[in-house]
Image: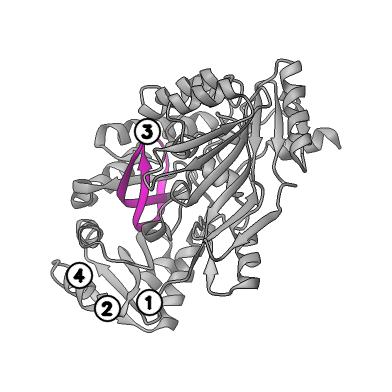
């Protein structure tokens, strides 16, 4: 039973799945602060690194801790809602609760309120894990990513110090630090430690135990309109996204189906296309943007047709090809700015890279327009995900070579992979440098694998 627990706790949703359960020396599932400190103390006394584990729905492999000897601390029992304050617009929760669980609690009290970070895995992903990857979702265009929706974080470092980071500006770059060690508090404050550092850090800075989250009422625009915009080519699709960003249209839903090589999906959606929801006040502006672009067909639709297309988009990733199976080889292509105007060229190069590595493009889709952070900058564009057909004789070497080729393409073409999908391959980024500096202050022993892994080590984790 203990070995089974070690294996299950070490599992995740990425292609980095070759887990050695014996490398998980001890698994802790704390329920309170005392048990968190005891788990950290065990790791420290045995000179073992710590990997924090949320829901395991991430696509990066970060929560596995690789096959290094380590202690895993899971947040699966840290699910309490400690406070909901509608007057001031926040909820204080433990790190193991999911967005769906939190929203069920919020809407039981006020149906027109919610927490506005909803990744596709919102029924599995924990709020602590979502902050660790700076996750977003369809709501990110208006609400921002997780970093924008966290008001305060409580975490513990490798020495058991409790650190509270309280946001004091809207850019996430300034915070008030409160710490049980005054010396550490001064160091962190001097180094401008903030929530943007914790976001996308993959648990390298400590164990997140509690969060104060921004909650808001649902859109003040009660009169929503729905539309489908069909593009004759990918450059036209990119142009629509570009113009919607330039006009800063407050879309309440924006999703792109970029490619679909599944006959049923393709027949029902006719990609490339955008599925849009927006306030009535912006209908004319959205329509004007779409109709000004050659090869774009704009169609206002009723809510029923909108919901049908939305459901197809949401379930796309769960649809396998008529023959064979799909694989999520590489997730989170961030395409923004002028790259949107050369969307066809970029997708062609991605597909050529896939094919050269033995994979057949299957589906591509994404939040569009959306927002994501690159370093400490907020970028507006599309976060595109893709699924590929697995070759019949798939080997771990083929998978890994495909990922490396895609990362190299992204760097060459100015595509910005979400941080969690690039960290294993590049040690020259601003984020890597910043995390290295902060982990030196905080003890270096939370998920050190992320900052010093080698390609050889990563390759060995691929099934």
The colour style of the image is: one colour
Quarter of the image with the N terminus is top right
* Residue for point 46% across, 46% down: 147
Residue 49 locus on image (x, y percent): 66, 22
* Residue for point 17% across, 67% down: 295
**How far is mark 3 from mark 4, CA to CA?**
32 Å
Query: Mark 3 falls on what kind of element?
Result: helix
The label on residue 358 is none
Sequence-first tag of 3 and 4: 4
The label on residue 221 is 1
User: Mark 1 or mark 3: which is in front?
Assistant: 1
Question: According to the image, label 4 marks what residue?
Answer: 290
406 lies above or below 227: above
Residue 16 visible to an observer of this rendering: no
Residue 106 locus on image (x, y percent): 61, 66
Residue 217 locus on image (x, y percent): 49, 69
Question: According to the image, label 3 marks what residue?
Answer: 407
**How far is mark 2 from mark 1, CA to CA?**
9 Å
């Amino acid at each position: 039973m203990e070995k089974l627990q070690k294996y299950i706790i070490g599992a995740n949703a990425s292609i980095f799945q070759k887990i050695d359960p014996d490398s998980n020396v001890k698994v802790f599932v704390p329920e309170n602060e005392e048990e968190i400190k005891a788990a950290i103390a065990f790791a420290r006394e045995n000179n073992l690194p710590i990997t924090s584990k949320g829901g395991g729905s991430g696509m990066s492999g970060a929560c596995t801790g690789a096959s290094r000897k380590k202690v895993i601390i899971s947040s699966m029992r840290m699910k309490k809602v400690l406070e909901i304050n509608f007057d001031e617009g926040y909820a204080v929760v433990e790190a193991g609760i999911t967005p769906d669980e939190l929203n069920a609690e919020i809407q039981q009290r006020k149906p027109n309120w919610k927490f506005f970070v909803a990744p596709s895995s919102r029924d599995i992903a924990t709020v602590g894990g979502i902050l660790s990857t700076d996750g977003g979702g369809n709501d990110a265009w208006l609400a921002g990513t997780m970093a924008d929706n966290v008001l305060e974080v409580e975490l513990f470092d490798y020495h058991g110090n409790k650190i509270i980071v309280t946001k004091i500006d809207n850019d996430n770059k300034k915070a008030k630090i409160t710490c049980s060690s005054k010396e550490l508090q001064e160091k962190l404050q001097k180094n401008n430690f903030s929530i943007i550092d914790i976001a996308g850090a993959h648990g390298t800075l400590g164990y997140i135990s509690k969060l104060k989250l921004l909650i808001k009422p649902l859109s003040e625009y009660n009169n929503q309109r729905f539309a489908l915009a069909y593009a004759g080519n990918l450059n036209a699709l990119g142009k629509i996204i570009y113009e919607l960003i330039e006009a800063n249209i407050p879309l309440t839903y924006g999703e792109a189906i970029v490619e679909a090589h599944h006959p049923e999906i393709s027949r029902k959606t006719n990609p490339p296309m955008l599925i849009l929801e927006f306030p009535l006040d912006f209908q004319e502006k959205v329509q004007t943007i779409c109709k000004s672009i050659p090869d774009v067909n704009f169609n206002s639709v009723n809510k029923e047709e909108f919901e049908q297309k939305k459901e197809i988009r949401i379930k796309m990733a769960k649809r396998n090809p008529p023959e064979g199976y799909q694989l999520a080889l590489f997730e989170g292509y961030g395409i923004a700015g002028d790259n949107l105007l050369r969307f066809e060229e970029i997708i062609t190069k991605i597909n050529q890279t896939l094919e050269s590595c033995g994979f057949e493009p299957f589906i591509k889709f994404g939040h569009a327009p959306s927002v994501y952070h690159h370093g400490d900058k907020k970028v507006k564009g599309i976060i595109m995900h893709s699924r590929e057909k697995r070759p019949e004789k798939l080997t771990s070497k083929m998978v890994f070579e495909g990922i490396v080729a895609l990362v190299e393409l992204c760097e060459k073409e100015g595509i910005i992979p979400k941080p969690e999908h690039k960290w294993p391959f590049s040690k020259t980024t601003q984020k890597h440098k910043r995390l290295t500096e902060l982990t030196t202050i905080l003890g270096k022993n939370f998920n050190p694998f992320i900052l010093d892994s080698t390609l050889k080590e990563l390759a060995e984790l691929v099934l």
